[in-house]
Image (cartoon, rainbow, N blue to C red):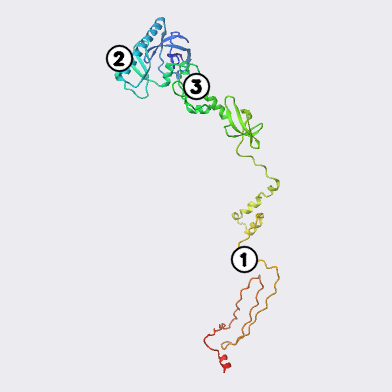
Amino acid sequence: MAIIVGVRFQNAGKLYYFDPQATGAAAGDTVIVETARGQEMGEAVTGPAEVPDEDIVPPLRPVLRVATQEDIDHKEENRSREKTAFDTCKQKIAEHQLPMKLVSCEYTFDNTKLLFYFTSESRVDFRALVKDLASIFHTRIELRQIGVRDEARMMGGLGICGRPLCCSRFLGDFHPVSIKMAKEQNLSLNPTKISGACGRLMCCLQYEEEFYEKTSRAMPRVGKLVSTPDGEGTVADVNILKETVRVRISKGNDMTELKDYPADQVHRVNGAQAQPAAPAEDQEDSPDPEIMHALRASEIDVPDEDADAALPPDDSEEQAPAEEPAARRKPNPRPRPPRPARREAPRKSSENNSPAPESAPQPERGKPTPAPKAPAPQPGAAPAKQPQKRDPWVVPEEFRQKKN
């Protein structure tokens, strides 16, 4: 365990830790400490405290002594010399025509170094300026380029709230600030209203950011459907500081009402609505396990006839086919008398004197015509001769005898 004290060198600067040793430094004392750039005078902000060795960033420099009156007078003398050095450096910058703005200058406590702080939009070649300043002050010169936030801290001033700048009073470190914070806090995105004296986003935007993020997660978003004690409605506005929700409720006839509710009385409505339970009649049409088993008949080699018998009846409308086959046509309901059989006189031929076969009876209308069956051949009989066709250019013998 090590004992440390917190020392601050500027009014709202960063806090550094030193080893008090046997000096007896306490909170509120002005102390002289050893730093990387020489001896410095600062103010002890925190008293001696024990911390684990793992939390200490080496090296832990010592506190030399508690400042005496002579040390305080020497510090005041250095401040008067800083004003003269500031005017001289500003004059030299104008002579060299350098694009830089001098902010402040500072002497170390032991006068071994003179530091100048400036701002610039680009990098500056100040080697010639350093040579001129070194020949005038006869000490080590160091120029440091800082940002606009550090400039506002050194210069000080009043913010748009009417109070001194936070960075020049109590803000030790600068935290990143984004435009997302202004959007979550529902602030105007006008740069003149959300920018500080340095021209950047105000540091106070991140003070309440954690509260806004935590509260906004528990509240519905604008445009979402919610349920309230007065019915369902749409979120029109959300007040995170008051933790209230303004809901637009429909009153019928294209009339709506805006009403504020506490956040705990407003609940989100899920997009999927609950479906009502099916009536008892519809439950009868639900597939039966045995029927579903019959539908999978192909998997267990069930005969098709048995599987078709197990299927439920189809309640869908039957669609008539475009043209029904002749075998399935329904007979004409109007009875018609059958046509008489048409007979022809037998025609004698010289080649074949056998009488002509009688014409087969015509089938009734609506019944399919049976195909003629060929006579079965008798065993041992010679094959029947086919009747020869008569040549139309040959005059029959009978016709010649009748003519003579």
Secondary structure beneath disc 2? helix
Left or right, residue 174 beside residue 81: right
Looking at the image, can residue 183 be seen?
yes
Q: Distance between the residues labelled 3 and 2?
A: 41 Å
Mark 2 belongs to which amino acid?
Ala
Report x, y in % for residue 188: 51, 27
Seen in the picture, residue 188 relative to 304 is either above or below; the reply is above
Earlier residue among tags 1 and 2: 2
Secondary structure beneath disc 1? loop
Seen in the picture, residue 285 relative to 231 is either above or below; the reply is below
Mark 1 = which residue? 325
Earlier residue among tags 3 and 1: 3
Mark 1 belongs to which amino acid?
Pro
Bin the neighbour count of mark 1 within 10 Å (Cα to Cα): few under 14, some 14-19, many 20 and up.
Answer: few
Left or right, residue 49 beside residue 82: right
Mark 3 = which residue? 204
Tell me how many marks there are. Answer: 3
Numbered mark located on residue 134 in the image: 2
Seen in the picture, residue 291 relative to 22 is either above or below; the reply is below
Q: Do the residues labelled 3 and 1 touch (CB within 8 Å)?
A: no
Report x, y in % for residue 15: 45, 16
Mark 3 belongs to which amino acid?
Cys
Bin the neighbour count of mark 3 within 10 Å (Cα to Cα): few under 14, some 14-19, many 20 and up.
Answer: few
* Residue at image point 66% right, 57% down: 309
**Front residue of this view, candidates 267 and 236:** 236
* Residue at image point 63% right, 52% down: 293
